Amino acid sequence: MSVFLRAHHLLCLSHFVGKGYSDGFTRHMAKVLARLKNGEELCLVSGCDDICSHCPHKSGGVCASGNPEAIDAEVFSRTKLSPGVRMTWNKAAGIIKPLCSDIQRICGKCEWRTLCEKNHKILDIFV
Ligand code: SF4
Ligand code: SF4
């Protein structure tokens, strides 16, 4: 099986420290990350993905919070990746790593940005 991910969730997973929109969401995100780290392939998508599936902000098949499409577009643009691309987590992490020092610009007004900025300095996020 593949893990389907929208582009900016590569960044979110890289900064994940067990916090999220709800307990169910957080538990699910931890499971997705474990699957990826265990070698399951990921496939990039546009729109809602296997993380959004457990998010309280998903409504009618789309995200009803903020403008995640803009962050996805920025990540796609900077990485030269596109929907439909498949790869391992390790490969994706290597591609996303250079973006992690610029999430202030990439992620804009995301409510988690302060936490992510703090944590990417201390986490060994690519193991
Ligand atoms: S906030 Fe939106 S983009 Fe983020 S996980 Fe929830 S539904 Fe998906
Ligand atoms: S700031 Fe928001 S969008 Fe950016 S990596 Fe963190 S949780 Fe994801």
Image (cartoon, rainbow, N blue to C red):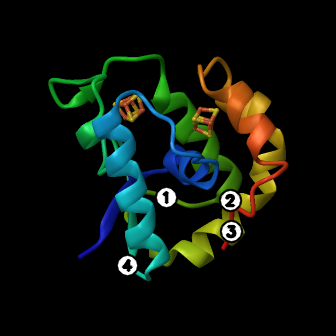
Residue sitting at x 46%, y 31% = 69
Q: Which one is earlier in the sequence, the residue at label 4 or at label 2? A: 4
Q: In terms of image quadrants, where is residue 119? A: top right
Front: mark 2 or 1: 2
Q: Which one is earlier in the sequence, the residue at label 1 or at label 4? A: 4
- Residue annotated with mark 3: 126
Q: Quadrant of the N terminus?
A: bottom left
User: What is the distance, in whole Å, between disc 2 and disc 1 at their CAs?
Assistant: 13 Å
- Residue annotated with mark 1: 82
> Is residue 30 or residue 68 the one in the foreground?
30
User: What is the distance, in whole Å, between disc 3 and disc 4 at their CAs?
Assistant: 15 Å
Q: Which one is earlier in the sequence, the residue at label 3 or at label 1? A: 1
User: What is the distance, in whole Å, between disc 4 and disc 2 at their CAs?
Assistant: 18 Å
Residue sitting at x 39%, y 41% = 26
Residue sitting at x 28%, y 38% = 24
Disc 1 residue type (three-letter):
Ser
Disc 3 residue type (three-letter):
Phe
User: What is the distance, in whole Å, between disc 3 and disc 1 at their CAs?
Assistant: 21 Å
Element carrying mark 2: helix
* Above or below for 33 versus 47: below
> Is residue 53 or residue 4 the one in the foreground?
53
Front: mark 3 or 1: 3
Q: Would residue 48 be visible to someone looking at this image?
A: yes
- Residue annotated with mark 4: 40
Q: Residues within 10 Å of mark 4 (few under 14, many from 20)?
A: some
Specify whether tag 2 is near ligand 2 (CB below 8 Å): no
Element carrying mark 4: loop
